[in-house]
Amino acid sequence: MQRILTFIICLTVGVCAMATDVTIDKESCTITKDGKTYKLYGKVKIVDSFEDIKVKIVDSFEDADIKIVNSFENTCGKVKIVDSFEDVKVKIVDSFEDIKIKIVDSFEGIKK
């Protein structure tokens, strides 16, 4: 019984330690995770590990619409995929995301 109780406590503490503080500010076009703020536009590098933000790509109920562009990624919601000199490193995930995005073709900016 003692082992089971110890396991449950360790599991609970581990899950709590993994929880992150994430805030999406559509007015400023930013996402803040663990006290560090990233723009929701700019140069993005897709990585498998050591990410800044975990992103889930969805078709509906998104936190932000994102348009992938080749240039002029200096507008809210527009990103350019790069291999180096990124503004933010992103890992694409299926669950436990920091933000849900919808990739769009036409773009009218981040919905507030």
Image: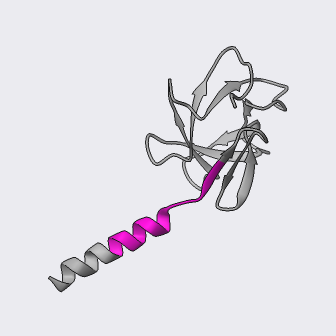
The percent position of residue 73, horizontal first and vertical second, equals: 81, 30
Task: Give the quadrant of residue 45.
Answer: top right
Residue 107, horizontal then vertical, whole percent: 72, 18
Q: Quadrant of the N terminus?
A: bottom left
Query: Percent from the top left, x then y, of residue 102?
Result: 58, 27
In this rendering, would 23 be left or right of 96?
A: right
Name the dominant secondary structure of the magenta segment.
Answer: helix
Q: Which residues are magenta?
A: 10-23
15 magenta-colored: yes
Q: Residue furthest left?
A: 1
The residue at the point 76 percent across, 36 percent down is 41
Looking at the image, which residue sits at the far top? Answer: 106
| Residue 11, percent from left and from top | 34, 70
Q: What residue appears at the point 50 percent right and 61 percent down from the top-left corner?
A: 19
Classify 100 as above or below 98: above
Determine if the magenta segment contains residue 71.
no
Task: Pick the residue in front: 111 or 102.
Answer: 111
Q: Is residue 73 left or right of residue 104?
A: right
Colour convention of the picture = one colour
